[in-house]
Amino acid sequence: MRQVVLTLLLLSLVHVATAQEKTKHWIFLTDKLDAASKHTLVESGYLSEAAVTRRALRGDPGLVTQFARQDAPISQAYEADLTTMGITVAQRSRWLNAVTAWLSAEEVNRVTALPYVRNVRPVAHLRPSVLPNTPVSTVIAKRTSSSCPSNFYGPSCAQLDVVNAIPPLERGINGQGVTLGFLDTNYSIPGESPFSHSSLVHIRDSGRLIEARDFSERDPTQPCNGTNTHGLNVASVAVGFREGDLIGPGHGASIYAAKTECAPYERNIEEDNFVAAVEWLESEGVDVMTSSLGYFDFDTGQHSYTVSDLDGDTGLTTIAYDWAAQRGVVTITSAGNEGPGGASIITPADGDSVISVGGVFSSGLIVSFSSRGPTADGRIKPDVSAQAAAVVIASRSGGYGLNNGTSFSAPMVAGIVTQIMQANPGLGPREVWHVLTSTASQSTNPDNELGWGIVNADAAVMTAVLLNRSNQTTPVPGNLTVHPPYPNPFKSTAHFTIEAFEPVLHARLAIFDMLGREVATVYEGPINAGGMPIAFDGTHLPSGVYAYSLEVDGSVQSGMITRLRHYALRALIHAADLARQTCLHFLS
């Protein structure tokens, strides 16, 4: 009899525990009281002045009304009513007009019946697509390349060389003045503060780590142990700077770091953390945001996503990324590590406004694990590719190691995007996408393995610079022109010819570097009718690509010219030619 009673008691306890079990749910609300004005958003502290400026410069002007509606705060009255019901809000999304909370089955029914609730559904539990965070080796040979000007870049030279990112760095283009936001795990060595690793401490010490915020410590059932260093590994590829060990292409950028995950391959992740972090980064005014924690497998359940949902319009992480792009943020993410065998792209890489990055070996061949397209609606993915095998990273030990995965090709491209935006701050997300894809290795024949191909950072930056100068003023009057200089590339002297069909009182021909700084005046003064030859002595200029501009009465005609001390620098010639062709395509 005692055994029967004990069995019944245990069964009743299981029943009670099951009845009280809570899972995280989205609570989508019906309305907001008012649309938010720009002034109100800034005054309340929600929207920074940097975000306002970026939206005005690069955002979609046709969506201003939508932005005002989406940016308006969630109704405090609705949230207060939920609180009186004993419900604690975990995350908030202004854009989705929703909150998340841990609800029992009985609470789900009660909340669903509320007049101001549009829908209640479980938060998708996502299994991130990353390779195990174990470096291939912690002993790195000092690999060299013919493109490495010195030992300055150390073993990271190879991964920079694959994407031709060293020439911009040699010209001082390193993302300075651009703000980059990360979404990842811990950005620190275990037990230390974020960005304390020797490759990242330069950002912290220079005051360019603007803020690091944790969105993962909001799950009462699964607290973070704080030991995963995936975020540290990723950030070092993009913005690391340690002479002789690791140099990232965007090491001059300013940084926001959002911790959205605890351990990317140890437990499931709630999508609301990602959405909340995207909204925060956008409101802080970042120019670029990058994530290396895309999602492919989903927990089974009432509202799980399927592969057919990877259409660019369904996953909430994808929607958040796309809406950030509408507001002028360049959004970048890993394509995934799901390998071949049909479409294996992950979310948010399926977004049509998202730059998804595949992976290659240093040889340029695709790595086996890199996810392939197309998306469920047939679009080409990934967009571009970079090295994803044996990538030099900052390691959890405080040293350096090698790791694999598109987790590390994405931050390389993010760093390059900061270079592009330093060269031309006026480019919006779509223009940046065009600059990257039109200068990549297979720009004319994209496929679902490498997208538009391996990124060519030098050509992309040159294109951005030339577009910047071409957009500054209107063309010179039709009665005056400067013919392309010859030879181009030149070794010591370049010859220009300015042709005028009638006299011009004042004209000015000048040379500018890739940062838009004037480095030489070729000619300044009157122009007589006819052709005027000018010999320019450029021996004082370092090898590189420059823009030349003929200015008359505020109007400008621009072009590009390359100075080579040694004509064997074919990579520079190729990049310059590609940039010229791309710019002509943009302006046609």
Image (cartoon, helix red, strand yellow):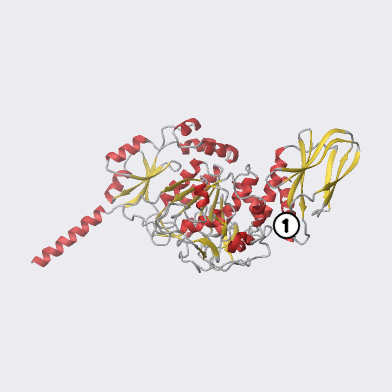
> Can you name the residue that lies furthest to the right here?
530
Asked which secondary structure carries label 1, the reply is helix
Q: What residue is shown at x 90% (from left), y 36% (from top)?
A: 528
Q: Is residue 345 above or below residue 69?
A: below
Q: Which residue is mark 1?
A: 572
Q: Where, by quadrant of the figure, is residue 511 drawn?
A: top right
Q: Is residue 266 above or below residue 183?
A: below
Residue 293 visible within the image: no
Q: Quadrant of the N terminus?
A: bottom left
> Can you name the residue that lies furthest to the left here?
1
Residue 173 visible within the image: yes
Q: Number of numbered discs present? A: 1
Q: Nearer the viewer, residue 35 or 441?
A: 441
Q: Is residue 42 above or below residue 442?
A: above
Q: Position of residue 133 (x, y in %)?
A: 46, 64
Q: Position of residue 488 (x, y in %)?
A: 81, 53
Q: Position of residue 560 (x, y in %)?
A: 76, 48
Q: Position of residue 83 (x, y in %)?
A: 30, 40
Q: Where, by quadrant of the figure, is residue 19 drawn?
A: bottom left
Indicate the amino acid at tag 1. Answer: Leu
Q: Residues within 10 Å of mark 1 (few under 14, many from 20)?
A: many
Q: Is residue 373 left or right of residue 512?
A: left
Q: What residue is shown at x 11% (from left), y 67% (from top)?
A: 3
Q: Is residue 302 left or right of residue 377?
A: left
